Amino acid sequence: MTGHARISLAAWGATVLGAMVLTPVFSGPFLFISAFLCALMTGVGVLLQNLRAPRIVVPIVQLVVLIELLSLFFLHDTMKFGLLPLKATALEFNAQLVDAMDSINRFSAPLPQDSHLTLFAVSVISAAGFLIHVIAVQLRQAAWSGLLLLIMYTVPAATVHGGLPWLLFIPPAIGYILLLSAEGRSRLSRWGRRISGVSHLDAAEPVEASALGQAGRRIGLTVVAIAALLPALLPTLPEGVIGNGLAGGGTGSGIGASISSTDPMLDMGKNLKRGDNVVALTYKGGPAGGTYLRLTALDLFDGNTWRIAPRSPGQKLNGGDLSAPPGYSGDLSKVQQTSMEIDVTRTFRSQFAPVPYPLRSISLKRDWRYDAGSLDVVSSNGSIVGGKKYKLTSYDVQPSPEQLHDAITASAPDQYTSVVPQRTPNDIKQKTYEITATAKDNKFEAAVLIQNWFRSGGGFTYSTQNAKGSGMAALEDFLLTNKEGYCEQFATGMALMARIIGIPSRVGIGFLPGSSGKDGEYTVRMHDMHAWPELYFQGIGWVRFEPTPSARVAATPGWTIAANANPTNPTTAPTNVPTTPGDRETPGATRPRNDPNLPNDSGTVIVDSGNWFTNGGGKAIAGGLGAVLLLCVPWLIRTLTRRRRFLRPPGRAAAEGLWAEIRDTSRDLGLDWSDIATPRQAGQWLVSKLPGDTHDAARRLARGIEALRYAGDAHRELDLRDDAAAVRKALWSQARLRRRWRARLLPPSWRWYLSRGTTEASDLLDEFDLLLARLRSLILPKRPRTN
């Protein structure tokens, strides 16, 4: 194989391996399509180079081929005569890339399997492959191509929530090493045949198992091993060693949780399903029975995701009263107010401060601001609310069903909360009109009907196993077919239905009231995270509804009783679920089984206080036992090695093993054993260290080893176990107590075997190199020598 062909194939392999880091970001067969297109482009380059084409021509032809292939695969309908990519193709390509960039900015990884996203991923990988080929093959600077591989790695590393799995660092590193190795071999092959090497093959073989090749492979494997282990170890460092840990630590359960400003809904789903139900915050005060604490509201829905609409920078907090809640036209001075004190734990990382709605004042200042439209309290410099303790006052707005029934909403309070995406299926619209048919065009009555349909009449089941999200396709499946989900689907489903019948709506993200404790303190944990719809009624403002079934939230807000409801003649038998003050009972749905995140009958998540073992004691014991076992590894290795040596039957191998045991015992006890001494010299040295009653045993042991080494097979049945045991016991008894304990816990001979293990691993690499050389000599005929 020629040098340029070898480097071309290595460049293709490096591109494919490097592109594997994009698998957490994109979905679908983008990697296989990219590998195929890059392979065709590489084949064209190798063919042109074999035909001695000018160097400048090769990349131009490859680029033309790449454009043609991308057009045929993704933009075939825009090509003239079905073959020529002209202006229409370029315009469509640009439009799809713009759509892809917009989706990347709006969606969280993994991105949906859309054609424009697949085109974007394939284009990026193919362009990187083309540039890697140009740099490595045409410019012969393979080392610089590593920058392109690094760029492909940094994109998902910066965008994937929680960081990339550390194992994904290995494929790009291996691809880069293969590329460097191919270029290095191509350079060395031009120097001629090697004179010497470690291979047992004929010296006329090309450079294959040479010392340079061995060194390169050892260095490469070492780099890959370090690169794999270092990211795996870094997440275990305590917070504050490297940054503040906002990105999380990979796929483990971890000890904290986060809510980002980019995709709060996705973060809520992850926190609900995570293993550790850590405490997020505690609070005192507020309405009797606890209160919902809101982080933010998602008011923009484009058919794919619910997210925070563009907002102004917000107003700086100064300790005074905030703006009045939007849409409320009553006299706020007559509304009851409550005071609270909230203490957020450091395990909850969010730029939003959890507060009740609507908020009047808060003690947070300096780098905290609020938005007048949503009354969100958010950090202005990226700091988190974890560890903060603040006081606040809020309005306890309790509208009556009659007020809501008479409210008239002429227009939306903004440009986002009334938008119904064009791609909304007609089946969802028809179902909404069917459910609200008896409301007689009253918005509030229609909203109550939708809420009751979710909680009792629609046959829905609460379960956190629904991982499809809240996009349009997921909502269609949830509302019409599957009917199984958790608060994300219930909240977004009702919000969409409310918009369909003309009620402005958004989705609130925050916490349930939590569980009450001593002295009126409430504890809110991460499994208390919740989503609910907020509907807008003129004169009252944003009003919370609760469509999530009673398996999660026992009661609905007291104001969500239809004004024409007949409490003495309910359509559904009431439940015996207790309600908080101001709330009414709502018929419950069947509680799903085997869901660890379900609440109890009080409407809050089940929190088992447990005992000292479940609250960290078990982990502490496990950690202590693990540390003890780790410290016992050297002792265990030495004990098993010694036992194996003394159990061998008499013979040459057994005698050498016993001699090695005396050597290791001497090293463990701090004695200066010489590796270059003969058995007779070592025997004399042992005699000088032992008491008189073991001198004869030491001499017999040394002479026996000498005879086995230098007298052939004359002493094959020589049994030296008794003499070795006596010498070892004497050495042990002569040592100090401190030295003996050190020899037990951390024997120095174990470190010697560890070093020996690295040497044996290196020998295995040598054998691998030689195996490759032998296989090559069998498969490829030797080139005839020329004089």
Image: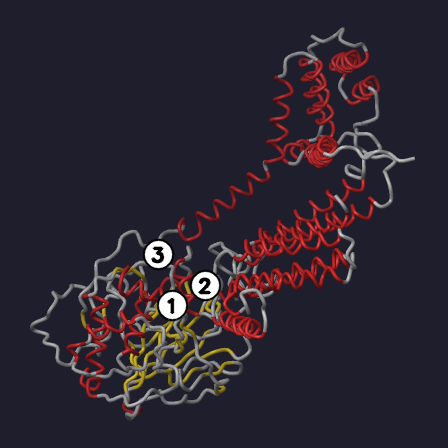
- Crowding near pointer 3: few (<14 within 10 Å), some, many (20+)? few
Question: Where on the picture, by quarter, is residue 243?
Answer: bottom right
**Three-letter amino acid code of the residue under disc 3:** Gln
Quadrant of image for the N terminus? top right
Q: Secondary structure at mark 3?
A: loop
Q: CA distance from mark 3 to mark 1?
A: 16 Å
**Is residue 107 placed above or below 462 in the rendered structure?**
below
The spot of residue 303 in percent (x, y) is: 39, 72
Q: CA distance from mark 2 to mark 3?
A: 19 Å
**Three-letter amino acid code of the residue under disc 2:** Pro
Q: From this viewpoint, which residue is outermost toward the right?
A: 787
Q: Secondary structure at mark 1?
A: loop
Per the image, the residue denoted by label 2 is 112
**Marks 2,1: beta carbons within 8 A:** yes
- Crowding near pointer 1: few (<14 within 10 Å), some, many (20+)? some
Per the image, the residue denoted by label 3 is 465
Dot 2 or dot 1: first in sequence order is: 2
The spot of residue 677 in percent (x, y) is: 84, 23
**Is residue 230 placed above or below 340 in the rendered structure?**
above
Dot 2 or dot 3: first in sequence order is: 2
**Three-letter amino acid code of the residue under disc 1:** Gly
Dot 3 or dot 1: first in sequence order is: 3
Left or right position of 153 against 702: left
Quadrant of image for the C terminus? top right
Front residue of this view, candidates 429 and 561: 429
Q: Secondary structure at mark 2?
A: loop
The spot of residue 84 in percent (x, y) is: 58, 67
Per the image, the residue denoted by label 1 is 471
Who's the residue at 31% across and 58% down the image?
463
Q: CA distance from mark 2 to mark 1?
A: 10 Å
